[in-house]
Amino acid sequence: MIPEDDPRALEAYEKGKKFYYTNRGQLNFSCANCHVQNAGMKIRSDMLSPALGQTTHFPVYRSKWGTVGTLHRRFTGCNKQVRAKPFKAQGEEYRNLEYFLTYMSNGLTLNGPGARK
Ligand code: HEC
């Protein structure tokens, strides 16, 4: 829940949401373009996962990384994919984004750590 008595919480949510729907990078994609509008479609060998539920299994072991990584590391990868300059892990932009994205999965069971290729 977004606490009603703390305007900073709603602000973080709104900023995270805006980030999620804003186009960026040379390829001019928003997060939502891939994980909402095109969820379930294939991009190269990957199936685009829906935004809902993405955060429940972090941190994730990725074979590409050879180790366990954070949600912010994943954000960095997705930003780079569209040739956008990634933001700093634990910086304000990614913290707001995390707040929005985890809010969307409220009520789902936490099932991490997950494993991805
Ligand atoms: C060009 C398409 C594209 C865009 C734009 C994109 N992603 Fe991704 N994203 C992928 C692909 C491909 C994967 C790996 C397959 C999957 O799990 O969806 C992925 C994986 C993820 C995962 C891990 C999912 C899991 O189950 O482990 C998260 C979280 C994520 N993206 C968040 C974001 C966020 C936040 C943005 C915006 C900053 C974003 N993505 C933008 C293509 C994209």
Image (tube, rainbow, N blue to C red):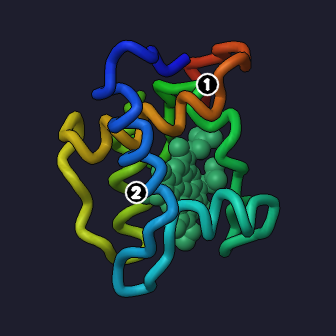
Give the residue displayed 34% in from the left and 43% down from the top: 73
Determine whether the beta carbon of the residue marked 2 sits less than 8 angstroms from the nearest atom of ligand 1. Answer: yes
Check disc 2 and report its element: helix, strand or loop: helix
Mark 2 crowdedness (10 Å alpha carbons): few <14, some 14-19, many ≥20: some
Residue placed under numbered mark 2 in the picture: 19
Residue placed under numbered mark 1 in the picture: 56
- Residue at the bottom extreme? 26
Q: Which of marks 1 and 2 is nearer the N terminus?
A: 2
Give the residue displayed 67% in from the left and 16% down from the top: 111
Q: Which mark is residue 48?
A: none
For the question of whether residue 29 can be seen, the reply is yes
Q: State ligand 1's quadrant.
A: bottom right
Q: Is residue 3 above or below residue 19?
A: above
Residue 101, given in percent of the width and then of the height, sits at 53, 38
Q: Is residue 100 left or right of residue 43?
A: left
Q: Residue flagged by tag 2: what amino acid is it?
A: Phe
Q: Residue flagged by tag 1: what amino acid is it?
A: Thr
Q: Distance between the residues labelled 1 and 2?
A: 20 Å
Q: In this view, does 46 lie above or below 84?
A: above
Give the residue displayed 36% in from the left and 26% down from the top: 9
Quarter of the image for residue 1 reads: top right
Quarter of the image for residue 116 reads: top right
